[in-house]
Amino acid sequence: MEDKYSAPATQQLLAKATLIDPRYRDINPGDDVKDVLLEEMLAMPDERSDGGDGEGAMRTSAAGEGEGSAPSPPEKKKNFADLLGKRKAQSSNPVPKRIRADTEVARYLQEEALDLHSDPLAWWRDNQARLLLLSKVARKYMTICATSAPSERVFSAEGNIVTPLRSSLKPDKVNMLVFLARNSKTEK
């Protein structure tokens, strides 16, 4: 096990995934892991620049071009004052992304760790609005599927049984052959 997980890149990945898991946030990962996590948070695209109002305005103008001069009800909902109000609300929050990221990490690390039987994905879903940048990074690391060596061995055994020459085997037969191959005692 030590050989498999001793690579520095693997160690850093495991440290970031552990820090992001709210059940283990009380484990001190070190400043280097926090710095790498902050850099990833800063590299994530910002919600405000991902389309939003500009994209919606393009859709409504494109939809209204071929229909004539009768405005549709969705166009009446958006007016110039609404657009200026949104712009004013956005410009009234000039907090740099770096400070927001630092604040989110500090707030996250100050909270108590969850018990081990709770669902970390549900916790991130509930706290996504409060920790917006960190939740994006959590989505990246909490979706890594855990695999085990025994399941990989079964897939390998199945690959050895279903060869190009034996590709027309029925699924039931393949299941029985895999079961026999994995559970029979082989003499050495």
Image (cartoon, rainbow, N blue to C red):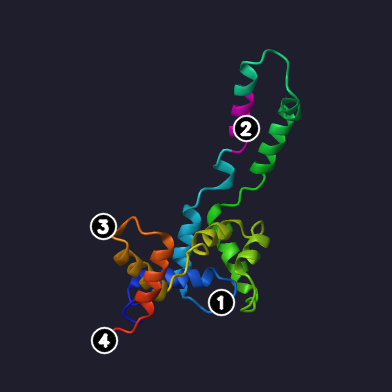
User: Amino acid under label 1?
Assistant: Tyr
Find residue 187 and name its label.
4
**Stretch of the chain drawn in magenta:** 52-61
Element on which disc 4 rests: loop
Task: Report if the CB atoms under discs 1 and 3 are less than 8 Å apart.
Answer: no
Tag 4: amino acid: Glu
Of labels 3 and 2, the one closer to you: 3
Q: CA distance from mark 1 to mark 3?
A: 49 Å
Q: Which residue is mark 1?
A: 24
Q: CA distance from mark 3 to mark 2?
A: 55 Å
Q: Is residue 171 something that shows in the picture? A: yes
Q: Which residue is mark 2?
A: 56
Q: Which mark is residue 165?
A: 3
Of 133 and 184, the residue lying toward us:
184
Q: Earlier in the sequence, mark 1 or mark 4?
A: 1
Could you tell me what secondary structure mostly forms the magenta stretch? helix
Which image quadrant is residue 23 in?
Answer: bottom right
Q: Secondary structure at mark 3?
A: helix
The answer to whether mark 1 and mark 4 are in CB contact below 8 A is no
The local secondary structure at tag 2 comes to helix
Quadrant of the drawing holding the C terminus: bottom left
